[in-house]
Image: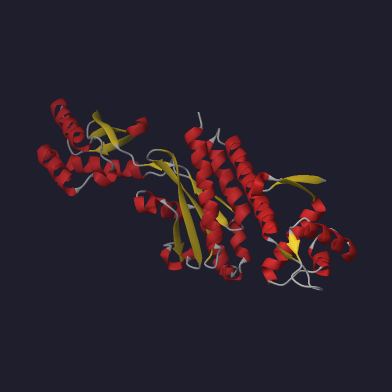
Amino acid sequence: MNKLIKCREGEKVHELDDRKLKILEAIIQNYLETGEPVGSRTISKYTDLNLSSATIRNEMSDLEEMGYITQPHTSAGRIPTDKGYRLYVDLLLLDKNQELENMREILIDKADRLEHLLQHVAKLLAANTNYATMVTTPQYKKKVKFIQLTEIDEGQLLAVIVFDKNIVKNKIIKVATSLDKETLLKLNIVLNTFLQGLDLTSINLPIISQMKEQAGEYREIVNDILEAIVQVVSEGDDFKVYTSGATNILRYPELSDIEKASELLYTFEEKKLLSDLIQDRMDDEESRGIQVYIGNETPIEAMKDCSVVTATYEIEEGVYGKVGIIGPKRMDYERVVGTLQNLMVQLDDIFKNKT
């Protein structure tokens, strides 16, 4: 089957059949590996065409006439010309762009349900990299929008905490004495005056001191409210980590020891440690680009012989999650970083253009 190939130079169109393309690709790849001219006998072993050396020589002569390869001296094999390299690179880029487009189409198909999308991303990355992968559900800094204290029983208060994005959390707080309506009103005013619009990292000691001063004899209730806010913000009931390809990293000898392998597989199956690792870094703005954690830089004991490369995806402003690739310390960092960068572009396009 013939293919029309459009070259950049002069936008000329040349027609090469599959056989010539495969032979040209084999010559270029072999020459890139060895730096030596490539003969027909080498190509006959290098390709899956099952052609005789004579047939390959004829095809190579045609490629030479077309200017894709050249013979540096008599009786030598062939080497690629600039024109041959250009065709090879154009085809390579075409294939890579098609891969990205296929990935984008797959992701768009899955985007109707974020959970399925993220699970598919984890599987796709594991298949493409041959490493283990993890993808988290998106998180955001929960800013307090409103707090309402209500007495529901003697010695018990219901704290309704409304965060931005209209996320509502409820917490029962035990108090030593019953509170009258006037006291509850005062506490509600104090809490909303000082905490409205703040996230957990913004509630500092000066703010807490001022709140306690305003609350007077009910300062301990302020402590209880703050603890309740910390608890509901820290709750991971809506935080999930999807993993895939855990067994991929066991193919590497340094990670295939029975004890190490068991610990790694348990870490991926149980997921709590992975969740803690990611959540510890969620609020760190400096970690929102591509980050690489090598060996002991990862706090998880089972991963001391691994490297973890993470990237951040963002659904909308302030709402973001993590994608990570885990492999041996001798992983192909350039490939992994490039894969994550391409994936971030695809996810960014999906999330920001999805209606």
Q: Residue at x 17, y 36 (%)?
A: 177
Residue 176: horizontal and vertical position, in percent?
Answer: 18, 39
> Is residue 193 placed above or below 327 in the rendered structure?
above
> Is residue 282 placed above or below 354 in the rendered structure?
below
Question: Closer to the camera, 87 or 96?
Answer: 87
User: In this figure, which colouring scheme has been used for the structure?
Assistant: secondary structure
Question: Closer to the camera, 92 or 211?
Answer: 92
Compared across the picture, whether 285 is left or right of 106 comes to left
Q: Residue furthest top?
A: 181
> Is residue 210 placed above or below 82 in the rendered structure?
above
Residue 224: horizontal and vertical position, in percent?
Answer: 23, 42
Compared across the picture, whether 190 is left or right of 233 comes to left
Can residue 284 be seen by looking at this rendering?
A: no
Q: Residue at x 41, y 44 (%)?
A: 236
Give the image quarter of residue 165: top left
Q: Residue at x 26, y 38 (%)?
A: 173
Residue 266: horizontal and vertical position, in percent?
Answer: 54, 58
The number of numbered badges drawn on the structure is 0
Compared across the picture, whether 217 is left or right of 273 comes to left
Can residue 287 be seen by looking at this rendering?
A: yes
Q: Residue at x 47, y 35 (%)?
A: 352
Residue 70: horizontal and vertical position, in percent?
Answer: 75, 64
Give the image quarter of residue 117: top right
> Is residue 290 placed above or below 258 in the rendered structure?
above
